[in-house]
């Protein structure tokens, strides 16, 4: 309506009080208490009312464009950048990217208002909050690490999906290690563990889901396992046990929500930055993660730790190399040769033992693909590197006794081609973790 005056509730209250003051029903000194101002300010308000009427009590900036408001040109540039270059980024990430790459220092809330006014919807729809019981963070850096894999089309919809393996510190949220692999696997977890051990050391514990690389999820129980009441560990589980890292499996996806939320952040940001950097393959992406992304991410998202210090235990490079490996059990042949699938490893005579024939040995494939043969805690043979890949999963029945089968005993073992998993020699490691699967 023409001539209408828009007022706030506070301004409307001032009009009613000034009407009483001018009408002589109350004094200005009494009105001062109702207005919540001093006597001098009450006189100013009365003066503006007598001079300009009701309009004199309306705030002087009402209807004016703020001096610090962004012009149409700036708004158009923000919308154009989002539509043409940063179309797959969320509001906060987009704000950081244009400040870093385009020199536009604009607040996140201003960016959000500009994009919503232009009809650009948020990247993710906000869900109403749900009630969950929160697990408190560990008090100290290194007390617990959480790792997991996230399969996704990280290099764009036109590329094949791959898996991002990530290890996060529970106390600080810091990325301890991250790498791209073709799929979530035992080899990927060992490579990620090797990265964490070399960069930070061994954490006190690792929290994880029940992926078959980490937890036995088969129904094959040997007689020894039935007696013990638990199955032998996986290849990764054996390595964690040898290093002295406590393995804690989660009972539900929600239990490890802290690392799942990190994957949400990574998917939100990393896909955009990989595209802007023109990265389309795993090897280049892994170099970029190490050289550029991890340090920048940790600077942005690491939280303050409750207790100073670190629970990480440092390890020598040689110790890491020896332990982080696939372990297989084999028997040396009469010709002092270890046969592992189609591979032959000749065992030379030792200083004290000239022949190792018939001896039970452990064969390890290390991160670089190289092979070593161990008799107790001594290396007795080596073999050139081959592809570092998943152990072949094959089950063989070791005992066909019908009486055992009648009792439900499953005398089977998982083997690498023609050899069963590694065992732990008596006196060197605890017998309780004999064998891997």
Image (spheres, rainbow, N blue to C red):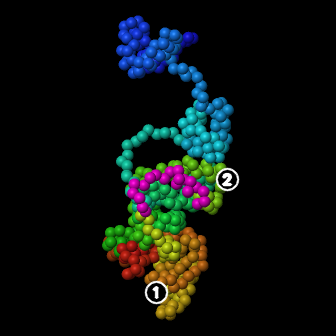
State which quadrant residue 284 falls in: bottom right
View extreme (top): residue: 23
Instruction: Say whether residue 289 is visible.
Output: yes
**Quick check: is 103 in the magenta stretch?**
no
Image coords of residue 289 (percent x, y): 59, 58
- Quarter of the N terminus within the rendering: top right
Whether residue 215 appears in this view of the structure is no
Crowdedness near tag 1: few (<14), some (14–19) or many (≥20) residues, C-alpha within 10 Å: some
Q: Nearer the viewer, residue 38 or 189?
A: 38
Identify which residue is drawn at 55% across, 89% down.
348
Which residue is label 1 attached to?
Answer: 359
Residue 412: x, y in percent?
Answer: 42, 73
In the picture shown, does residue 62 fall above or below 74? Answer: above
Q: Magenta part of the protein: which range?
A: 290-310
Q: Quadrant of the C terminus?
A: bottom left
Query: Per the image, is 299 magenta?
Result: yes
| Nearest the eye: 427 or 326 | 427
Which mark is in front, 2 or 1?
2
The residue depicted at 60 percent of the width and 59 percent of the height is: 291
Q: Circle 2 is placed at which residue position?
A: 278
Q: Secondary structure at mark 2?
A: loop
């Amino acid at each position: 309506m023409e001539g209408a005056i828009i007022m706030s509730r506070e301004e409307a209250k001032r009009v009613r009080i000034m009407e009483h003051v001018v009408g002589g029903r109350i004094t200005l000194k009494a009105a001062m208490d109702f207005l919540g101002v001093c006597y001098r300010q009450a006189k100013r308000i009365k003066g503006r009312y007598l001079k300009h009427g009701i309009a004199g009590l309306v705030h002087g900036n009402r209807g004016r464009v703020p001096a610090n408001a962004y012009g149409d040109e700036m708004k158009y540039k923000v919308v154009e950048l989002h539509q043409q270059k940063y179309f797959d980024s969320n509001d906060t990430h987009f704000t950081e990217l244009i400040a870093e790459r385009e020199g536009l220092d604009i607040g996140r809330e201003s960016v959000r208002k500009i994009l919503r006014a232009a009809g650009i919807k948020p990247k993710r729809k906000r869900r109403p909050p749900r009630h969950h019981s929160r697990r408190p963070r560990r008090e100290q850096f290194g007390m617990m690490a959480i790792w997991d894999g996230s399969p996704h089309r990280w290099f764009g919809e036109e590329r094949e999906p791959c898996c991002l393996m990530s290890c996060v510190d529970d106390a600080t949220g810091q990325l301890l290690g991250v790498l791209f692999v073709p799929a979530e696997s035992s080899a990927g977890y060992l490579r990620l563990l090797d990265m964490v051990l070399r960069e930070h050391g061994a954490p006190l514990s690792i929290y994880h889901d029940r992926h078959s690389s980490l937890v036995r999820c088969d129904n094959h129980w040997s007689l020894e396992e039935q007696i013990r009441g638990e199955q032998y560990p996986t290849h990764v589980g054996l390595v964690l046990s040898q290093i002295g890292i406590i393995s804690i499996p989660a009972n539900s996806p929600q239990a490890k929500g802290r690392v799942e939320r990190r994957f949400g952040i990574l998917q939100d940001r990393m896909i955009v930055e990989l595209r802007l950097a023109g990265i389309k393959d795993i090897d280049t992406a892994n170099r970029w993660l190490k050289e550029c992304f991890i340090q920048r991410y940790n600077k942005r998202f690491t939280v303050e730790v409750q207790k100073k210090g670190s629970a990480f235990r440092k390890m020598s490079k040689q110790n890491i190399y020896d332990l982080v490996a696939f372990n297989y059990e084999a028997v040396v042949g009469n010709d002092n040769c270890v046969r592992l699938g189609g591979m032959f490893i000749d065992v030379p005579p030792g200083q004290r033992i000239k022949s190792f024939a018939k001896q039970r040995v452990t064969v390890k494939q290390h991160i670089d693909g190289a092979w070593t043969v161990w008799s107790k805690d001594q290396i007795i043979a080596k073999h050139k590197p081959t592809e570092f890949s998943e152990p072949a999963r094959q089950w063989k029945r070791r005992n066909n006794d019908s009486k055992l089968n009648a009792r439900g005993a499953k005398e089977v073992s998982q083997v690498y081609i023609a050899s069963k998993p590694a065992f732990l020699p008596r006196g060197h490691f605890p017998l309780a973790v004999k064998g891997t699967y």
